[in-house]
Amino acid sequence: MKYASLYKNTLLTDILPFWEQHSLDLVDGGYYTCLDQTGKVYDTDKFTWLQARQVWQFSMLYNQVERRESWLKNAKLGADFIKNNARDSNGNFYFSMTKEGKPLVQPYNIFSDCFAAMAFAQYAKASGNNEFREIAKATYLNILSRKDNPKGIYEKGTGERNLKNFALPMILSNLVLELSDVLEPEEIERTLNYSVNEVMEVFLQKDSGLIYENVMQDGSLHNSFDGRLINPGHGIEAMWFMIDIGVRKNDQKLIQRASDTIIRILEYGWDKEFGGIFYFMDAKGHPPQQLEHDQKLWWVHLETLVALTKAYEQNPSSTIAHWYQKVHDYTWSHFPDLEHGEWFGYLNRKGEPLSTLKGGKWKGCFHVPRAMYQCWKSFEKIESK
Amino acid sequence: MKYASLYKNTLLTDILPFWEQHSLDLVDGGYYTCLDQTGKVYDTDKFTWLQARQVWQFSMLYNQVERRESWLKNAKLGADFIKNNARDSNGNFYFSMTKEGKPLVQPYNIFSDCFAAMAFAQYAKASGNNEFREIAKATYLNILSRKDNPKGIYEKGTGERNLKNFALPMILSNLVLELSDVLEPEEIERTLNYSVNEVMEVFLQKDSGLIYENVMQDGSLHNSFDGRLINPGHGIEAMWFMIDIGVRKNDQKLIQRASDTIIRILEYGWDKEFGGIFYFMDAKGHPPQQLEHDQKLWWVHLETLVALTKAYEQNPSSTIAHWYQKVHDYTWSHFPDLEHGEWFGYLNRKGEPLSTLKGGKWKGCFHVPRAMYQCWKSFEKIESK
């Protein structure tokens, strides 16, 4: 498997130029993320988490790849926009804003805050501006304080069925590593231990080897739509966060369990008829509630490539190599738009684009470039061995 | 076009027996609506609006078709369950409950209340029980009082972009006719005038002839995801409510405008490549936000058959006949499950079942039997002319 140059070239000559050319709002600051197949802006609303992800992306490249001034400038465009517009008086982040930065949708979703904290930490490092470091830290502490009731007053559950959701411990496990320059070592350790325990001991099920999206507060499973929900891409993405933590802690057991879980989820989530990985599944095989359940999404496949590459980098095996090749062939033959650049986001079950958008409310400048960077770096190490 | 007996027989020998056999919860009351292809219960949660719709369905049949004791008994099973469990202390209806009737999801959605009011009014008429008549009336008044902020404390918008939604005036236009035994004539008149004006003068656009799902408070259009959203099935369903009102008021102009609008929306929403009517569209042709936008849904096609049949009953024309036949052929060849009875709910763009469920969180005992009844009765009149 020799792919370092494929990922590097795609990142630097296809993906980044697409966003640099089409997404910058040089009038009001921040980014357009609603881009059609050719890159034309079709909607100007600004979704905080996508704004933050793009700030993070350009800052990270500036910090890790090359101190290119244009990347820092692009990051600043979004960082200032979020800082000036996205926070309410309690330090919570609005879900979305108008082009001009007026708040549109209230802070009902804590993931806006998570990505803002990541963005500010990377941007503080890139720019050397301590103000962003302080906001990153304050935002992180605010996330922790909201952790047990992340939706706050917008929570619609009565408390009768007290499920907890996988997304928050999963994202915390990545967020805390992202904030390693900002937080005290004891704080990092505490949150890492909490997240790893939640992900690997609570949400990962010992008998099935699968990760459930929702479990009861005591860790037991619940036989309901939410309680049966499996999101294979989500579980696999979390496993590469676990591998990163395993490397940091030199915890071979954690790395091995994460690698095994990637393969287990792939065996379960792979569409044996048409190829690709399902978006949602019901653990008991019942009809999923989500009408989009059988679609093939760009981020699911990219995060799987990252996870397999990292797993292979740590412990090469023919099983991982086999699955890497299978997912690689599907992904690279279905998602890239050879005509207009960047990648399609949404395919139907049979692999045909359902929508030709390059960005929207949920797809921005994040999963494609992050995965390109991660796979590039892992393959560099694999290929130099 | 001779179809009265097709609709009647399907209703009485296929659809109703399916729900009578599989959906009744004789232990805790109410209905199971999550039924797999064969009718087996796969989830026991109870969604207020689907509970109410089934109460309405059996009560209506008892009132309109035949005073069959089993139908009244079935209606009572759900009516008592809703009355005893679904209301909070302010008279708002929970969105969902457990099998036993414990509240699960708060009253964030006013459509639960709308269908509860309809159910109680029909059931009061069927049972002669005045208590239900009183709750229907109180619920109706509560809906009116919540009309300008239907989501209450669960509203996530900041007020910056003050869109109003088509669903409430649309449903009120049907609800008020359903409550004609319960409300004062002046109240009926007032709400009918309000609804007809909102639907035909505000949401229906004079230039395009299309109905938008969301417009600004002053009736202007807004160039945003929500502001560009078209739901062809929704608009067409509203047009048969308008025809019913036109018949009641002997307003030929309203009937004609509604009929013309049905055809206009159909021309716009019909999938010229694979047949069937799209679920969601963007008025400017941009990528819709909804990942399920190109799916073909049972209710969209059934409500279109009802609308075309009613339009033809009032003013026969070759254009309506042509469209009726086209939609009839698509619908009857794709949705009925010839093996296990009842109808599939969700097809992919090409017309293949995406899910084989007969009921779930959004599909219950409502659109199929209501459409069967409406088309049966209209075709009886058409065929006897």
Image (tube, coloured by chain):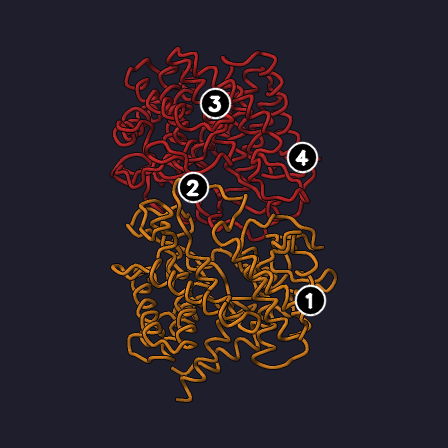
Chain colours: A red, B orange
Q: Is residue B43 visible?
A: no
Structural distance between the alpha carbons of marks 4 and 2: 47 Å
**Label 2 is found on which chain of the structure?**
B
Label of residue B77 in the image: 1
Structural distance between the alpha carbons of marks 2 and 1: 41 Å
Mark 4 vs mark 1: in front: 1
Residue that carries the numbered disc 4 in the rendered image: A206
At mark 1, the secondary structure is helix
Residue that carries the numbered disc 2 in the rendered image: B159
Residue that carries the numbered disc 3 in the rendered image: A117
- What's the amino acid at mark 4? Lys
Label of residue A34 in the image: none
At mark 4, the secondary structure is loop
At mark 3, the secondary structure is helix
Q: Residues within 10 Å of mark 4 (few under 14, many from 20)?
A: few
Mark 2 vs mark 1: in front: 2
Question: How many discs mark residues in the rendered view?
Answer: 4
| Marks 2 and 1 belong to one chain | yes
Nearer the observer, A201 or B367: B367
Q: Earlier in the sequence, mark 2 or mark 1?
A: 1
Structural distance between the alpha carbons of marks 3 and 2: 26 Å
Left/right placement of residue B291 relative to residue B49 reads left
**Label 4 is found on which chain of the structure?**
A
Q: Is residue A196 visible?
A: yes
Structural distance between the alpha carbons of marks 4 and 3: 33 Å
Q: How far across and down, in percent of the image, does residue B5 sit?
A: 48, 82
Mark 4 vs mark 3: in front: 3
